[in-house]
Amino acid sequence: MKEKYSAFYQHLAELSKRSDASRSSHACPNAAYIRIFSSFPEEEVIRPPYARDTDRILNSMAYTRYIDKTQVFFLVDHMHIAHRALHVQIVSRVAQTIGRALSLNDDLIEAISLGHDIGHPPFGHEGETILNALAKKVKIPGFAHNVQSYRWLEIIEDRDLTIQVLDGILSHNGEKDKYKLIPDRQLSIDSIQEKYERSLAGRDSLPSTYEGCVVRLSDSIAYVARDLIDALAVNLLTREDLQNFPELCYEMLEIDDIWEDRNKIERKTVDLLVKDLLYTSYNQDMISFSEDGQAFLRAFKRFNFSSICESPVLLGNQKRMERLFSDLYEHYLDDLEHERNDSAIFTDFLDNESTSPRYREEVTPEQAVLDFLAGMTDNYFEARCKEIVLPVRVQHFSGRN
């Protein structure tokens, strides 16, 4: 069969070489890709390695669960607020726009973008905070969604992604206040595993590729205005609350009234920040916003954090959720230790065909339960709570047992 297509393969190989040659010297070439295991055969001429990674991410079970994982506003019935599935697509579109303008590797940018939030647990950042505390309580170093994204794709599902994509996923922390990034461009199997351990210990790591830097900053561009729009959509913020919106942001957005012009905020914010980043980064050895762009983003994020993320309304269920996470943890740990094979931790997770045999052999019971909880969607978590926490109602008693 290969002989039949040999001329065509040669043509595609030449196109791939030309594509690498036409990119910026800062771009990560397709030819530089490295996989830790190289478990699956591949023909680079049909699908370049980072495009193949995108397909592997899209076909993972973890990616499927994006659809029912909330972004910021959980336990709210509203059809038009952002979920993780939409957020990662917006990040991908923003990052690819920037990548094309800077002649970087589009395929690598897309793969990092679509995989970067796969490790987010149910109930957004609140779920992450609760799981982090729970992990430390059971003598596990901690929980962070970027580390969990790596775990799902490389360890639990064994997707065998390139270390370039894994590096971008581990280092994407858009929540961190760093807006001038210079990649070290030093990547190896040893270095990516060192970065994983460092991230597991709670230390921030910068991306090693320019593409990873673009995704990290695009993450902030994608969510900063959308979080505000969603807060207005679910009536978390009133017109009065917007009196504290930063004057600098009003000026740079050229908007007089956020309440009246809410339909313009996201478009104007993305346009402003993309252009600012491109202007500052073009022909430079860094990916960065200007001083004005950084000041705008910091002010916008501070407003969102104090007005949205720390809202008593949003955090009203915290104590209940902490108890529920703890109850589910204890229940499934007991199921695991007593080998109750009909338990959901077996049927829906450990015995699922997408879960790697290597993971099943090596994982500790405590880590397995944390991974299971982290992989739950919001609705699945609620269903398991009803199943486990609420007493079972019966129609009638049938006698013995």
Image (cartoon, rainbow, N blue to C red):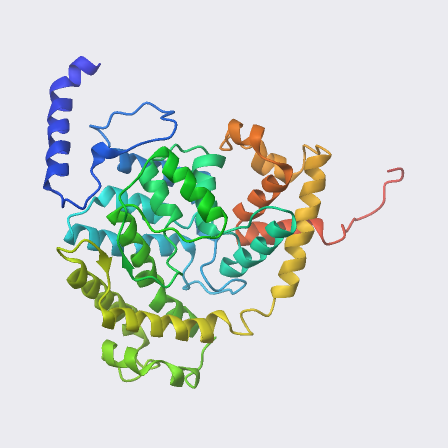
- Place of residue 366 in the rendered image (x, y in percent of width and height, measured from the top left): 63, 41
**Which quadrant would the N terminus be assigned to in this image?**
top left
Residue located at (61% from left, 65% from top): 318
Q: Quadrant of residue 397?
A: top right
Position of residue 340 in the picture relative to residue 135 (left or right): right
- Place of residue 262 in the rendered image (x, y in percent of width and height, measured from the top left): 32, 76
- Place of residue 389 in the rendered image (x, y in percent of width and height, measured from the top left): 71, 53
Specify whether residue 64 is in view.
no
Question: Vertical placement of 79 versus 118: above or below?
Answer: below
- Place of residue 179 in the rendered image (x, y in percent of width and height, measured from the top left): 30, 62
Position of residue 299 in the picture relative to residue 251 (left or right): right
Q: Nearer the viewer, residue 137 or 313?
A: 137
Question: Vertical placement of 79 versus 9: above or below?
Answer: below
Question: Vertical placement of 185 versus 286: above or below?
Answer: above
Specify whether residue 35 is in view.
yes
Residue located at (12% from left, 23% from top): 10
Position of residue 113 in the picture relative to residue 198 (left or right): left
Residue located at (49% from left, 36% from top): 156
Q: Nearer the viewer, residue 32 or 327?
A: 32
Of all residues, the one furthest to the right in this rendering is 400
Residue located at (18% from left, 53% from top): 285
